[in-house]
Amino acid sequence: MFQLFPTLEFRSIRTFVASTIFGGFLLCASGSSFSIQTATKETTNASSHGLSRASLIANTEDAPYELTPERRALLNTIRYAEGTWKDGQDKGYTVIYGGGMVSDLSRHPERVVVKRYSSAAAGAYQFLPATWKGVARELELESFEPQHQDQAALHLAKRRGALKEIDQRGLTKIAMAKLAPEWASFPTSTGLSAYGQPVKSHQELASFYSKNLNSLKRQVNV
């Protein structure tokens, strides 16, 4: 993988958490019971309410992975590392390798772009077509919509053995090293990319994660 909304209603369903953008960053922490339920067309509705996937932690009851604060923090940090953060705006979910964008998220665009490298990576987490097809099949995802991209990224993190580490200890160097084979922008234990590509430092990613997590904790405790 290369440099890789809604009428809100308060209910006690599962753990849904609201978050805010803090200095251009966002992060998450688990354990809160503050809940928000979103309508089916979250992206469209949230945009009309000034919200975004980055500033809203929510998932449907049948979603494979619960979107706890730590996990939303992880997702936002991956976006930051992969160059699709876009100030937390939802348009990051439409980005293809090279910086272009697509409007149809009914499926992975599978559009090969040749720049410094040749890649068909797409979405907030820069999924390669083969990777996306495999995860979409395993999780039975029906589209390339933002909520499905979020679930797929968490699934990849789990397969790499990083999700448990992040749930318990946050974005540690150990977690980053586990994610490095999946996302080239994440550093290995030596601080280098697993694929010889540009990479973010441990310190930079940990700082992004930490600032956003603290912001989210403040929001949850309101």
Image (spheres, rainbow, N blue to C red):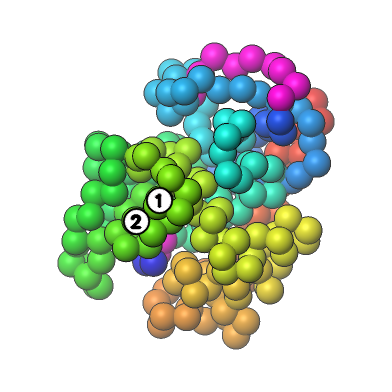
Check disc 2 and report its element: helix, strand or loop.
Answer: helix
Task: Report the predominant secondary structure element of the magenta stretch.
Answer: loop
| Residue drawn at 78 percent across, 61 percent down | 169
- Vertical position of residue 179 compared to residue 188: above or below: above
Residue 5 on the magenta segment = yes
| Residue drawn at 47 percent across, 23 percent down | 40
| Residue drawn at 41 percent across, 80 percent down | 195
| The N terminus lies in quadrant | bottom left
Of the residues shown, which amino acid type is indicated by label 1?
Ala
Q: Give left or right: position of 36 versus 29.
A: left
| Residue drawn at 76 percent across, 28 percent down | 34
Horizontal and vertical percent position of residue 75: 55, 51
Residue beneath disc 2: 133
**Which disc is residue 136 wearing?**
1
Q: Give left or right: position of 193 versus 174.
A: left
Q: Nearer the viewer, residue 126 or 198?
A: 126
Q: Nearer the viewer, residue 151 or 83?
A: 151
- Asked whether residue 212 is in view, the answer is no
Quarter of the view holding residue 140? top left
Horizontal and vertical percent position of residue 48: 43, 18
Magenta-highlighted residues: 3-13
Q: Residues within 10 Å of mark 2 (few under 14, many from 20)?
A: some
Question: Do the numbered discs 1 and 2 sit on residues whose CB atoms are within 8 Å?
Answer: yes
Of the residues shown, which amino acid type is indicated by label 2?
Lys
Q: CA distance from mark 1 to mark 2?
A: 5 Å
